[in-house]
Image (cartoon, rainbow, N blue to C red):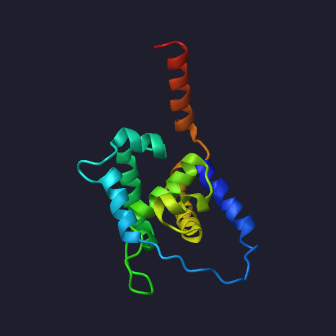
Amino acid sequence: MMAMAGAFMFQEQASSSRHCSHSRKVVRRNRVEANQRLMQQYFVPNPTYDARFFRRRFQIPLSLFNRVMSVVVQHDPYFQQGRDAAGRLSFSPEQKLTTSLWILSNGCSADSLEETFDMGETTVLQCMRKFCNAIICIYGPEYLRSPNMEDLRAFFITAINVAFRV
């Protein structure tokens, strides 16, 4: 997941200079209904799809998703649900993170999520960019560093145990 996040950030930097200046059509989206649908599918006590489906679709166990979401929401206020400039309820943390994970796990384009998550391409890309930045800031120092002697020792012990089936 870290490698895909890094690749996404590189792609975003390369494409950020190609913005057009033409006006966009406003699409009315029902964020609240989309959030209720997502919550019913995965996050309520008796969801439509159980944790196995969540893991299969998002390539991450639901329990780990909840831990990551908690840390990311604390790290970046963008992921907290609030209100937009018009006073409407913004997308929930679950919506923002699941769209990011959907792209990472399925390798699809941001505009392909419009109907599934009722979220526009620009918002999906913003969620993805902020999610990748948060993951790198939070977990980068531990997981994106060079291995130290203790890491190498643990790796070799594991490799020997697997090779000799100890």
The answer to whether 94 appears left or right of 154 in the picture is left
The residue depicted at 67 percent of the width and 54 percent of the height is 7
Instruction: Determine the residue located farthest toward the left in the rendered image.
Output: 45
Q: How many marks?
A: 0
| Residue toward you, 41 or 69 | 41
Q: Which residue lies furthest to the bottom in this view?
A: 86
Location of residue 159 (image quadrant): top right
Q: Position of residue 21 (x, y in %)?
A: 72, 83
- The residue positioned 38% from the left and 67% from the top of the image is 92
Front residue (pair 70, 51): 51
Q: In which quarter of the image is residue 69?
A: bottom left
| Camera-side residue of 104 and 10 | 104
Residue 92 relative to residue 5: left or right: left
Q: Can residue 137 be seen in this view?
A: no
Q: Where is residue 154 in the image (x, y as percent from the top left)?
A: 51, 31
Classify 78 as above or below 112.
Answer: below
Give the residue drawn at x 61%, y 52%: 108
Q: Does residue 60 sit above or below 8 in this rendering?
A: above
> What is the x, y in percent for residue 54?
40, 44
Report x, y in % for residue 87: 38, 85
- Judge whether residue 100 can be spotted in this image: yes
Q: Does residue 166 lie above or below 133 as drawn?
A: above
Residue positioned 39% across, 47% down in the render = 64
